């Protein structure tokens, strides 16, 4: 039968009739209280005792503390007020059901007794605080004692004369009022029966509004004062805890404009450059998918992954999100950064190169040095496919790697990066197939290592290749080539510096890259590792050149 029904013995109240129609009889149904375990020891003990008390009042063998159906209800007819009381009011008569329980084992609670108890407690709180609060306040105390003066008007007997020594302290406290307060002690001294009757009614009439301005009923009790102090203390503690929490949260205040912190976590030289990068990327970030992470956190998370090579699990702990959220955020943000920062790795015009050519290159080779080329390798995990193992195993590194061609201008700016190739691929093959040769112009001079045997292909373009044979310092040179080779080797140090900066600045390229980073992105002819290398080179170009 649909609807709710009361579980109390001999109580047949239901929310619906036999036909399933809702009854509008004003009766409500309430669930049995739950045992709350995670809100402190006091709440846990109170809710446990309340659940036990309800089950004891209902007194049914099929209902136990641990096994109670979710459909179990108690109707409003078993409570004085028609509903259960707040769980913290343990003395309230409706803390447990007590009416019409179908047995006499539970005594009916007395609501009037509870109301009398509440009134007594309220009266005690109202009586106790005023004396404690009137002690430091000098003006209100005379206002309460001053009504003793009028009886001296109707009874000109000895008692007023005995109580007269109490008047000077009240007069000394009220020296600020007008002259009548100064004449008051002289009048009783001269004419005891008449002067007090004439002067004393005037002094209270003038002074009464000042001491009695705050009525006794409107004065804050001591309990309110203590509660206010507790609230202020909690608010101050809450403010301090929020400040401490902001220090550990990866939000906009994490970097706080500190250039050293920015350089350590992102690799960028200063906070202003980071803000510029953030403003550039924010309109394109996947904000709808990553609701738990702000644009600031998306960019910071990606840079920290590249810069410090932090594991996904550790970033999940730092940003307080699930590890799958971190992985998705890194993947999507990396795609946005590649699309927006890719133009920073571009091939400049010959006029731009000549304008800022360092004098070392001009002295050795004139104005025609176009680029310095080299390859660097990134370690990867051992592939499961046999063919992939053969293609990625590097004889030079004796490990499985991905190889990238990198081209640097004489100014130290990275102007070209190729897609990834297996570590077994030769430098010559990568240079020929990467599209780098198409960017050379007639008369360009390219500085390369001896592994780049590309003289034939460059010669077809009327360009010239200067090859350094100082590989590992163990080559034999002819006397006529020594001078030229030394100049090339000296200038190729800039290449080693730039590659070292890229790899040292972004430790992700130092680590062993997972295999899933080598799977091509959907709809693109690029691997995530290709995007990472390009983004790292673009970020390096945003920093100060090492040349």
Image (cartoon, rainbow, N blue to C red):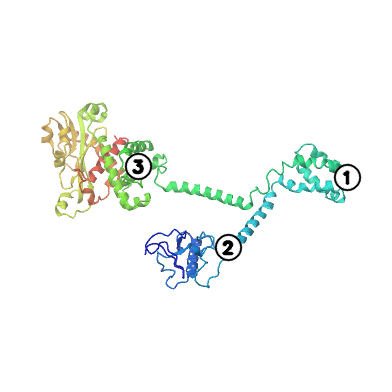
Residue at the spot of label 2: 111
Which circle's residue, 2 or 1, is located before the other in the chain?
Answer: 2
Residue 542 is left or right of residue 484, and the answer is right
Tell me the CA gap for discs 1 and 3: 89 Å
Q: Which mark is residue 193?
A: 1
Q: Alpha-carbon neighbours of circle 3 within 10 Å: few (<14), some, or many (≥20)?
A: many
Decide which of 364, 123 is in the foreground and name it: 123
Tell me where residue 117 sits by quadrant: bottom right
Which residue corresponds to the image point at 17% horizontal and 49% vertical from the top-left? 392
Is disc 2 surrounded by few (<14), some (14 to 19) or many (20+) residues within 10 Å? some
Q: Nearer the viewer, residue 318 or 172?
A: 172
Image location of residue 113, percent across then percent down: 61, 63
Quadrant for the C terminus in the image: top left
Q: Residues within 10 Å of mark 1 (few under 14, many from 20)?
A: some
Q: Nearer the viewer, mark 2 or mark 1?
A: 2
Which one is in front in this view, the residue at disc 2 or the one at disc 3? 2
Please state if 216 lies on the left or on the right of 527 as rendered: right
Q: Which residue is mark 3?
A: 295
Per the image, label 2 sits on a secondary structure element best described as helix
Q: Position of residue 382 (x, y in %)?
A: 20, 54
Q: Is residue 497 above or below residue 519?
A: above
Q: Is residue 172 shown above or below 70?
A: above
Regarding residue 503, the answer to whether it shows in the image is no
Q: Residue at x 27, y 47 (%)?
A: 510
Give the mark, 1 or 3, whose residue is nearer the N terminus: 1
SS at badge 3: helix
Q: Residue 522: where, in percent of width, then height?
A: 21, 46
In the picture, the quarter occupied by the N terminus is bottom left
Q: Residue at x 42, y 42 (%)?
A: 253
């Amino acid at each position: 039968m649909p609807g709710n029904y009361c579980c109390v013995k001999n109580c047949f109240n239901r929310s619906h009739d036999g036909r399933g129609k809702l009854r509008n009889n004003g009766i409500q149904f309430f669930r049995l209280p739950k045992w709350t375990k995670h809100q402190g020891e006091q709440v846990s003990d109170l809710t446990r005792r309340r659940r036990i008390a309800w089950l004891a009042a209902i007194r049914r063998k099929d209902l136990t503390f641990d096994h109670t159906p979710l459909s179990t209800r108690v109707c409003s007819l078993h409570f004085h007020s028609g509903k259960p009381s707040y769980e913290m009011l343990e003395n309230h008569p409706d803390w447990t059901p007590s009416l019409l329980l179908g047995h006499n084992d539970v005594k009916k609670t007395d609501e009037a007794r509870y109301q009398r108890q509440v009134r007594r407690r309220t009266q005690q709180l109202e009586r106790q605080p005023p004396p404690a609060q009137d002690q430091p306040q000098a003006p209100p105390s005379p206002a309460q004692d001053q009504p003793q003066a009028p009886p001296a008007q109707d009874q000109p007997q000895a008692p007023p004369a005995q109580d007269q020594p109490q008047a000077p302290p009240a007069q000394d406290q009220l020296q600020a009022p007008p002259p009548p307060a100064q004449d008051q002690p002289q009048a009783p001294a001269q004419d005891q029966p008449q002067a007090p009757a004439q002067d004393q009614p005037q002094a209270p009439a003038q002074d009464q509004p000042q001491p009695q301005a705050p009525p006794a009923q409107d004065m804050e009790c001591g309990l309110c004062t203590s509660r206010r102090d507790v609230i202020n203390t909690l608010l101050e503690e809450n403010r301090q805890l929020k400040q401490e929490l902001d220090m550990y949260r990866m939000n906009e205040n994490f970097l706080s404009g500190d250039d050293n912190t920015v350089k350590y976590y992102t690799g960028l030289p200063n906070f202003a450059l980071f803000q510029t990068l953030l403003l550039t990327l924010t309109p394109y970030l996947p904000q709808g998918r990553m609701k738990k992470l702000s644009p600031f956190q998306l960019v910071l998370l990606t840079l920290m992954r590249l810069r410090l090579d932090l594991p996904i699990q550790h970033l999940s702990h730092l940003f307080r999100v699930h590890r799958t959220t971190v992985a998705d955020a890194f993947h999507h943000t990396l795609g946005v950064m590649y699309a927006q920062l890719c133009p920073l790795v571009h091939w400049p015009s010959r006029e731009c190169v000549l304008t800022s050519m360092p004098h070392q290159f001009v002295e050795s080779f004139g104005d025609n040095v176009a680029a310095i080329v080299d390859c660097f390798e990134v370690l990867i995990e051992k592939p499961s496919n046999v063919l992939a193992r053969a293609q990625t195993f590097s004889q030079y590194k004796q490990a499985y790697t991905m190889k990238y061609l990198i081209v640097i201008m004489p100014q130290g700016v990275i102007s070209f990066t190729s897609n990834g190739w297996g570590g077994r691929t030769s430098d010559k093959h990568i240079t020929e197939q990467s599209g780098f040769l198409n960017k050379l112009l007639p008369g360009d001079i390219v500085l390369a290592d001896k592994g780049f045997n590309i003289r034939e292909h460059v010669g077809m373009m009327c360009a010239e290749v200067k090859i350094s044979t100082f590989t590992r310092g163990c080559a034999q040179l002819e006397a006529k080539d020594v001078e030229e080779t030394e100049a090339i080797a000296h200038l190729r140090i800039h290449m080693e510096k730039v590659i070292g900066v890229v790899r040292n600045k972004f430790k992700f390229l130092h680590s062993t890259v997972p295999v899933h980073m080598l799977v091509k992105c959907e709809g693109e002819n690029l691997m995530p590792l290709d995007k990472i290398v390009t983004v790292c080179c673009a970020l390096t170009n945003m920093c100060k050149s090492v040349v």
